[in-house]
Amino acid sequence: MSITRVKRIGPKRVIIYVRLSDEDRYKKNKNDDSESIANQKSMLLKYALEQGWEVVAIYSDDDYSGTDNNRPGFNKMIEECEKGEVDIVLCKTQSRFSRDMEVIERYIHNKFIEWGVRFVSIVDNADTDVAGNKKSRQINGLVNEWYLEDLSDNVRRSLQNKREDGLFLGSFAPYGYKKDPNNKNKLLIDPVAAEIVKEIFSMYKSGMGYYKIAKNLNDRGILTPSNYKKENGSKYVCRSAKYGMRTQWCQDTIYGILRNEVYMGNLVQGKKTYVSYKNHKQINKPKDEWTYSYGTHEPIIDVDTWNAVQCKFKTRTRVTRTGKVYMLSRKVYCKECHQVFTRNLYKTSEGKTPYLKCKGVRLANHKCNNNASIRCDVLEKIIVDEINKQLDIYYNIDELDRLYTIQKKSLNSSSISKKEIFEQEKEELNTKINKKNDYYKSIYEDKLEGIISQDEFMMLREKFSKEIEEYKKRIKVINDELLNIKTNEEKVQTSKKVFEKYKHIDKLTKEIVDEFIEQVLIGEINPETNTRDIEIEFNLIRLD
């Protein structure tokens, strides 16, 4: 389709377009134009009068971003231009029209020319009728887009600061918690749901698998997290729920709860991000870029239970027909070939007897000579005896307290002072970042008003960007150091609690194995002595 434009005789018809991004404090009421919008209109009307142009319409968009392509005033202006009912579009600056380079190219440099519409912005001297002005307009468009990109980075930085300060930023509280009615960024325990969370951790710790736990909850009619939120008036909608059907507990839900550090009083946020300020599709961030905040709210699960459960995730274990995991599963390994010892049954006159044997013996491409099995009850007795030996050494409470105090003081003498120094440095770096962002916004406004040149703006922008990037790198190093300090403190505390918990052990359980044992190494049988080496590696820190 071809369009023929007839040159109009008489005053040029002008559409004035004005825009402001943020609400202005000078509005008298919600429906009034902001003072900045009024100032733009006044300036542009005066300019049009001086040029002898006829203003046929004024369109404005208050509280709309320059990247928003669904602005009502903007769309009406485009419609008028396409109809051929306007000769000139007049703005204060090109950025008022749009900060999106794609929009600038589409309309100012293409469609407007096709429609016979001239674009003029009076502060930055953009004029499509001036030869050689296009490159200047394109540079303006790039600078405006860079500003938007930097502004987006500033918003992200602001949210990141809130995450690092331990503020909860989620739309809905995790299952087991509710938002503080007086502070939406703080979590409070929901007593009803918290009891179910404790049960889930307890069942898994005792050896039950995901499926068995989910079935237990479904059989008892316990509401799933999404159904529980709905029952309590939340607007949360589970994406997997269809046609109003109630969801069921499943293995993925159980796994997600068991892996969520929120139940230990910590926040792990910033797991996803947007592709860009233009593309709002979410993508996953690498784990080392997640934000960890510790002790931000009251925990539902204690440190010992959490650590015991997480240890089980390090190795995959086979669930028996009863829905439980054998207590020594993935704990016993061959000292010769380092393959795992697997549990099997063999028939005797007394019935089926469980035993452990090196997996490497049966592997065709990995033949191991450590082919002698060991009965489960025999190995369990050996382990119980070794644990009791450790308890006999450490159980004296007075001595345990003394050793713990010495160990903690030794740790604190270096960690507390380091922690305070790191926290103070981190706070100072965040303050510097905020100041640089304020400076950057200020020089951008100076550039728009013509106070500083384009070259000066670009030089300062590059300088501020480099400084902010260095500050961010240092903050990441500090966060890693703070995490190491906290981990060491928890290890010492956990060791003391375990030794205080047990005086003597008569029978081995999954909980005891997870608390005491890192791994058990079993060697070959010596044909001369008919004995074999069995090494037990404990996972606790020695307090002496």
Image: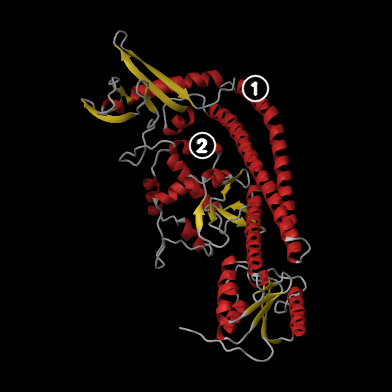
| Secondary structure beneath label 2 | helix
- Residue 137 circle label: none
Residue at image point 64% right, 79% down: 118
> Tag 1 or tag 2, which sits nearer the N-term?
2
- Residue 402 circle label: 1
Classify 10 Å Cα crowding around label 2: few (below 14), some (14-19), many (20 and above).
some
In this orientation, does residue 82 appear? yes
Pinpoint residue 371: horizontal percent, then vertical percent: 27, 21
In the displayed orientation, state which residue is furthest to the bottom.
Answer: 9
Q: Is residue 360 above or below residue 25?
A: above
Q: Is residue 111 above or below residue 259?
A: below
| Secondary structure beneath label 1 | helix
How many marks are shown on the rendered structure?
A: 2
Q: Is residue 106 above or below residue 372?
A: below
Q: Quadrant of the C terminus?
A: top right
Mark 2–mark 1 distance (CA, rounded to whole Å): 25 Å
Q: Amino acid at mark 2?
A: Asn
Query: Horizontally, is 312 left or right of 477 in the view?
Result: left
Pinpoint residue 273: horizontal percent, then vertical percent: 54, 54
Q: Quadrant of residue 491?
A: top right
Q: Is residue 211 above or below residue 80?
A: above
The residue that label 2 is drawn on is 307
